[in-house]
Image (cartoon, grey):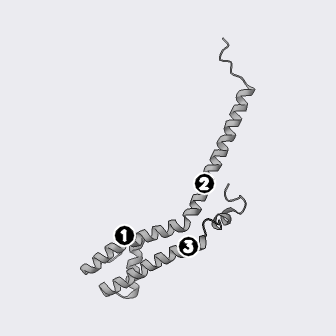
Amino acid sequence: MFMTSEGGIARLVRHPLSPFKKRAIFAVAILGLMMAIGTIGMMILEGWDLVTSFYFISLLATAEGPAQSPMTVGGKIFASFMAFLSIGAAITAITFTFGPLFGSILKEGFAYVEREEDKLKTRLERKDHAHPSTDEEG
């Protein structure tokens, strides 16, 4: 299984084609930028304090649905755009960071199933050769 192979998950995370730390930092930076833009925007457009604005945007970014809605037309339009952008940024951050890891795990899982299938086919072929069919008798 993938957990017991040489290096396990550490090998996948440190794979030369997918530098995990750089990907994670870049993904978090994009998400942080979106959160900062959204928080500042709501502070300016709605006149909310920092905590309320950040809370609103964080609920928006996680598709949780904020408890309150903006009162101004500009705030509503800004929140609508931020909903699409921040949810996209959150999903992208998760996918960009962990996508290679999930892909490697999935690939190793398929390889394991294929190896087991080959073993089963070999065992069935041996069984067929050891006990030839007697369909032509009778």
- List x then y, in percent, for residue 30: 47, 76
Q: Earlier in the sequence, mark 1 or mark 2?
A: 1
Whether residues under marks 1 and 3 lie with C-beta atoms below 8 angstroms apart, the answer is no
Q: Quadrant of the N terminus?
A: bottom right
Which element is circle 1 on? helix
Furthest-left residue in view?
73
Number of other residues with Cα within 10 Å of mark 1, as a class: few under 14, some 14 to 19, many 20 or more: few
Secondary structure under tag 3 reads helix
Kind of residue indicated by mark 2? Lys
Q: Which residue is mark 3?
A: 24
Q: Position of residue 64 (x, y in %)?
A: 40, 70
Per the model, the C-alpha gap separating discs 3 and 2 is 21 Å
**Residue plotted at (63% across, 54% down):** 108
The front one of 111 and 138 is: 111
Q: Secondary structure at mark 2?
A: helix
Residue drawn at the location 25% of the way across and 81% of the way down: 72
Residue 29 percent location from the top left of the image: 50, 78
Amino acid, disc 1: Phe
Does 53 sit left or right of 106 as displayed? left
Residue 14: image x %, image y %? 65, 68
Per the image, the residue denoted by label 1 is 84
Where is mark 2, residue-wise?
A: 107
Asked whether residue 65 is in view, the answer is no
In the rendered image of this protein, does residue 24 appear above or below residue 105? below
Identity of the residue furthest to the front in this view: 17
Q: Residue at x 70, y 28 (%)?
A: 128
Give, as a three-letter code, the residue at label 3. Ala
